[in-house]
Amino acid sequence: MEDVLKNIHIDDLPYLERDLHIAQKVSLAFLLFGDSHGHATYILQKLLALMRSPQSEQMHSDLLHQYALNANPTHWRGHLIEALCIIDARQALRKLGLNWPELRLHYLPHVRELALHIHPLLKAMYHICEQLTITQSGRLILDLNEKLTRHKQNNEPLHFYDADYLEIFLLDWLTHRHLRLGDINAVGSDVQLLIEYFKFNDLKSLATLLIETVNSGAATQAADNTLPVEAVAKEEKDAVAVESDAAANAPTAALDRCPNALQVRRKNAGIMLIINQQRFHRDVGEDVRHLLPTVKLSDRNGTDKDKERLTDVFSGLGYQVEAHDNVDHWELLDHIRSACSRSQLRDSVIVCILSHGFEGAVYGANSIALSIVDIQNVLCGNRDLHDKPKLLIIQACQQKEDLNQTCIVNARTESPIQQANMVLAMSTVARFVALRHSVKGSWFIQTLCDTVERKAATEHLLDILTYVIGKVSTQRGDNKQMMVPIVANTLKQKVYFSDN
């Protein structure tokens, strides 16, 4: 491995960084710069400027290059690789020619409080960011900032408000010394602000993680015959003791999962059907010619990027991805029926339609529209699937067009129970367009894939979709365009994707 690391050149880093999404860049900056006060202050300002930039400019950041320039010239490669392992950036590691099983053994020990190069408290705080829901993160930020202001410890307020990037707020608190990391063994550390918050808000497992990380550093220091960090107060030890061994030793991703949730297992996840409409024609029979739109539908450039990203992300979760391009309206329904009939022994089924549309409808490749309600009824029509999660994802405009009509489909469910455990996730609310980049793909699908990739191991399905709504709604196009996705569901339980 050492030989491979030596081959990583500083000039390769800008190209590597282009393949990282913005959430990964924030996490890497936190892990790599968080333990250097001067550099952390500088990089915090860089991150804030990056977050306010258009998406097209966010690709061309130079955070990793800056790290390599300012770090120890003999050690920066090991630090970088460990940070990439911690955030599970496997695609980037593969591009560097590194072997994931070997890396995992080297950089991700089973004792999660330990780290090789990265400061262990930064690693622990990163995992905390991954475990908290956006609601929990937002509440933590508000409560701690209010507490610091009340005690006049808040310096210049941070003009940033996206709770999805908790690492930015942690970096701010570190630069103002409200949190202290201490040395590499956590000697001289002070994370009591977080420990007390987690205990008070029934998040004891997170307090435990911080306490055990500090204690592990103290034990390491003691083994080296050096004065250990001051012992944790007795009540903190008692709080740790009441945590069950199962909770203390559980994998990070599984700590907060509900015991009665529906689990989508990797080995039996199910079918993901992608209907990818890029080109449209008007060659239809006389019986449906009156349903054609008055204007020829344009090509949907960029939709292949959405198809590729969906395939990559959901196949990684164990789904059998079946993608079909430019499908006429009746064929579209046949594909859905086929996927449902083959899903009776699977854990779930996902249908994703990428097309043009108008309010309440989407188009087949033959320019004939289908009602979204009818599509839902077809998806829910199989009685044997009522207890399984069924996810319908639609990327299509939903503008109001009075002249359009949909093909009448005899699709009805016989019982309301067949509509249970159904989730409809749409790129936009009614009466508005769905924005799509002609090269990079659509805002909604790309953000969905980024969020699933980042959160699938820790968050249930509806929380993931809530993240997506929040993220998309903050984006702005070059001409200040904006959009808000919408989600409707009849889930009876929380749904988690496989975490192993």
Image (spheres, helix red, strand yellow):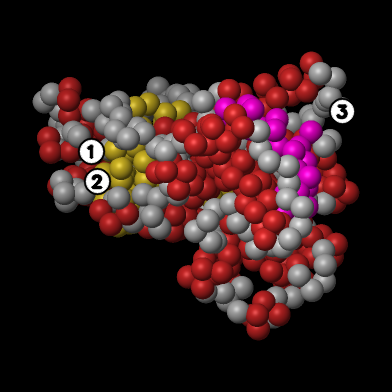
Number of residue marks: 3
In this picture, which residue range is highlighted in magenta? 178-199
- Frontmost of labels 3 and 1 is 3
Residue at the extreme top: 150
Tell me the distance, in whole angstroms, between the alpha carbons under discs 2 and 3.
50 Å
Residues tagged 2 and 3 counted as in contact (Cβ below 8 A): no
Q: Earlier in the sequence, mark 3 or mark 1?
A: 3
Name the quadrant containing residue 311: bottom left
Name the residue located 46 percent from the left edge and 33 percent from the top edge: 242
Q: Is residue 230 above or below residue 473?
A: below
Name the quadrant containing residue 308: bottom left
The location of residue 141, given as percent across then percent down, is: 67, 27
Q: Earlier in the sequence, mark 2 or mark 3?
A: 3
As drawn, the label of residue 347 is 2
Circle 1 residue: 388
Task: Check disc 3: other Cα within 10 Å, few if <14, some if 14-19, many if 20+.
Answer: few
- For this view, does 385 lie left or right of residue 162? left
Name the residue located 65 percent from the left edge and 80 percent from the top edge: 2
Disc 3 secondary structure class: loop
Circle 3 residue: 156
Residue 334 seen by the camera: no
Name the residue located 29 percent from the left edge and 38 percent from the top edge: 262
The location of residue 223, given as percent across then percent down, is: 67, 60
The location of residue 146, given as percent across then percent down, is: 73, 19
Amino acid type, residue under disc 3 in the picture: Glu
- For this view, does 417 lie left or right of residue 278? left
Q: Please check the rendered image and state whether residue 188 is part of the magenta-colored stretch, yes or no.
A: yes
